[in-house]
Image (spheres, helix red, strand yellow):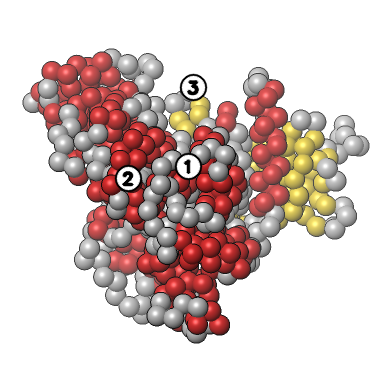
């Protein structure tokens, strides 16, 4: 006998099941208030999981569902509502009448190139919109792309929804929740940005035209190795009728190193426009690795806001204006003017507009760059800049100021702020230094450390050069070098170091042969270790790479780096290298992916 009380989630009444997957079940439901059909996804919660983990997942699920509800785009399945019912999270989507791309590919085998390009444009356009809101999908695959029957439009579903940690792997079948649809950085478990979505879309583009997955193998281990090693058959080797522009777009998307990958959905749309009928030929004479890379960070300044919040971008530029005061405190007008020009370019306005005549030009006669800086810096930095002008006429560096003097108090406060990572206090003391003259070398070094903490390595470089311009400054810097290098160590541990930071260590501080820097190559931190290798090699210091690769091999951070370490140890072929590989090859139960690769490399080098 049918139940008289239909199942409800929030106000939504379940009508019938639509499907099921690793994350839960999808139902056709009705919204009785707005009188419309919705697709209701009920997330499967693992009851055996820790209560804290479940609570954290529910919190993040609700947060991201609300964030995704902000998206409004014809190729994004709209999110209407989200909530929790009896401990089960649910989300209400727009109901799309049609079929998934997965079903379409299974039914057709391969899709005509023109249709594949049209679908790719739809999804790339959706990503451009979502990435403008700093929302990354994380699970792009044919099953999450719906083809609307009436319009033929491709729509991206499940946008921005947190994936349950217990739904990612299935140890019973040795498969991943979305096998082959994870970018190398997803496999590594590092923070994701827009380029992870572009990698996954490249997989989908390949699959639509080739009729098969580029990386999918019989086991999870083999699939991961193929993904990280970029091991796939190029599209034009499968079908030479594929436009070169489309083939090139796929190759750019599938670059395993995200710094060499296509940089944005906007760039992908431009490439796809060249792939259609009557399009201009695409220059593919340069290999992917020779294309200039761009680090796509989460900074709003690097986003294209289709309809996103411009206030975030303005906040980013305000930080740049604030940093100009620091350049004036250190009497580095060239750096200030350069920063202003860069800010003007970022804001999209003509640089000349910031460098026009101003009422302050009379005060800065003969120094047009300084006049321009005053005009651009704005009121927020004006007081600090005017005070810095006074310091132009006073030189010299006295003995360390007394603790009860203003400069002594600021030095103490700034050092304390840096030790406690109190950014607000650190910036306040830097502003306070603008009222002091002459600045002691210790104060200048503290200003440089604040700049390093903020990632303003070019400004820090100018400060250090100023410190080294006097004998007293060189003496103080030599004494303070361990503290400065410890500041730099924090930055080098966070990721691939910026060129300006490496240059600061190598050519300004001349620390390439410093014992502290040499010790960093033995650090358990992957990025500190490899940034130190770059510094030492640039300083013509010989580096024993075997222990570096062994640390990579036994680390748990980056699967790509671990696979590369296996290959390099095989090439080295020393007794230590082979012993490390044999040890890795024996870990078949605890580390199957690396064990398999180590065994292969050992066998290869025995031949």
Secondary structure at numbered mark 3: loop
Q: Nearer the viewer, mark 1 or mark 3?
A: 1
Q: Quarter-wise, where is residue 559 in the image?
A: top left
Whole-number angstrom distance, CA of label 2 to CA of label 1: 14 Å
Whole-number angstrom distance, CA of label 3 to CA of label 2: 68 Å
Asked if residue 461 can be seen in this view, the reply is no
Up-down relation of residue 353 to residue 558 (above or below): below
Quick one: quadrant of the C terminus?
A: top left
Q: Mark 1 packing: few (<14 Cα in 10 Å), some, or many (20+)?
A: some
The mark nearer the N terminus, 3 or 2, is 3
Up-down relation of residue 68 to residue 177 (above or below): below
Residue 123 in the figure: left or right of residue 548:
right
Residue at (80, 57) in percent of width and height? 36
Residue at (35, 26) in percent of width and height? 524
Residue 547 in the figure: left or right of residue 194:
left
Residue under numbered circle 1: 401
The mark nearer the N terminus, 1 or 3, is 3
Mark identifier at residue 80:
none
Secondary structure at numbered mark 1: loop
Residue under numbered circle 3: 172
Percent coordinates x, y for residue 112 in the rendering: 41, 64
Quick one: quadrant of the N terminus?
A: top right
CB atoms of marks 3 and 2 within 8 Å: no
Residue under numbered circle 2: 472
């Amino acid at each position: 006998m049918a139940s008289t009380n239909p199942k409800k989630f929030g106000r939504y009444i379940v009508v019938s099941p639509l499907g099921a997957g690793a994350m839960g079940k999808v139902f056709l439901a009705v919204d009785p208030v707005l009188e419309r059909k919705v697709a209701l996804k009920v997330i499967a919660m693992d009851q055996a999981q820790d209560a804290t983990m479940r609570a954290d997942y529910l919190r993040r699920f609700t947060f991201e569902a609300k964030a995704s509800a902000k998206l409004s785009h014809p190729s994004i399945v709209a999110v209407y509502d989200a909530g929790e019912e009896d401990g089960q999270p649910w989300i209400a989507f727009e109901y799309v009448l049609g079929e998934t791309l997965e079903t379409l590919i299974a039914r057709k085998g391969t899709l005509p190139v023109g249709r594949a390009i049209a679908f790719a444009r739809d999804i790339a356009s959706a990503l451009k919109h979502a990435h403008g809101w700093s929302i990354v999908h994380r699970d792009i695959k044919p099953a999450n792309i719906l083809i609307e029957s009436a319009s033929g439009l491709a729509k991206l579903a499940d946008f921005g929804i947190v994936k349950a940690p217990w739904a990612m792997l299935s140890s019973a079948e040795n498969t991943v929740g979305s096998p082959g649809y994870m970018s190398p950085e997803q496999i590594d478990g590092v923070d994701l940005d827009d380029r992870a979505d572009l990698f996954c879309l490249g997989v989908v583009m390949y699959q639509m035209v080739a009729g098969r997955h580029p990386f999918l193998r019989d086991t999870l281990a083999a699939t991961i190795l193929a993904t990280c090693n970029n091991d796939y058959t190029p599209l034009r080797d499968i079908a030479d009728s594929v436009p070169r522009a489309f083939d090139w777009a796929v190759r750019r998307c599938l670059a395993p190193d995200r710094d060499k990958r296509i940089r944005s959905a906007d760039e992908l749309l431009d490439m796809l426009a060249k792939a259609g009928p009557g399009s201009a030929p695409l220059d593919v004479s340069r290999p992917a690795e020779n294309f200039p890379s761009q680090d796509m960070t989460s900074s709003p300044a690097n986003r294209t806001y289709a309809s996103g919040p411009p206030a975030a971008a303005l906040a980013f530029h305000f930080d740049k204006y604030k940093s100009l005061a620091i350049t004036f405190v250190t009497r580095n007008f060239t750096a200030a003017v350069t920063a202003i020009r860069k800010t003007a370019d970022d804001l999209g306005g003509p640089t000349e507009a910031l460098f026009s005549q101003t009422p302050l030009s009379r005060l800065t006669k003969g120094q047009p760059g300084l006049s321009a800086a005053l005009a651009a810096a704005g009121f927020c930095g004006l007081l600090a800049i005017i005070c810095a002008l006074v310091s132009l006429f006073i030189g010299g560096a006295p003995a360390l100021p007394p603790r009860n003097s203003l400069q002594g108090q600021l030095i103490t406060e700034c050092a304390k702020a840096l030790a406690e990572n109190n950014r607000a206090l650190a910036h306040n003391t830097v502003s306070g230094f603008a009222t002091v003259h002459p600045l002691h070398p210790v104060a200048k070094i503290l200003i440089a450390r604040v700049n390093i903490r903020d990632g303003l390595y070019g400004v820090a470089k100018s400060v250090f050069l100023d410190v080294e311009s006097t004998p007293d400054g060189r003496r103080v810097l030599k004494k303070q070098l361990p503290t400065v290098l410890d500041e730099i160590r924090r930055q080098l541990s966070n990721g691939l170091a910026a060129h300006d930071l490496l240059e600061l260590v190598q050519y300004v501080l001349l620390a390439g042969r410093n014992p502290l820097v040499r010790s960093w190559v033995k650090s358990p931190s992957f990025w500190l270790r490899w940034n130190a290798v770059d510094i030492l090699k640039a300083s013509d210091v010989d580096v024993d790479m075997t222990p570096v690769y062994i640390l990579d091999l036994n680390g748990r951070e980056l699967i790509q780096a671990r696979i590369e370490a296996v290959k390099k140890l095989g090439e080295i072929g020393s007794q230590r290298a082979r012993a490390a590989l044999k040890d890795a090859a024996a870990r078949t139960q605890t580390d199957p992916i690396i064990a398999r690769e180590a065994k292969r490399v050992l066998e290869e080098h025995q031949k």
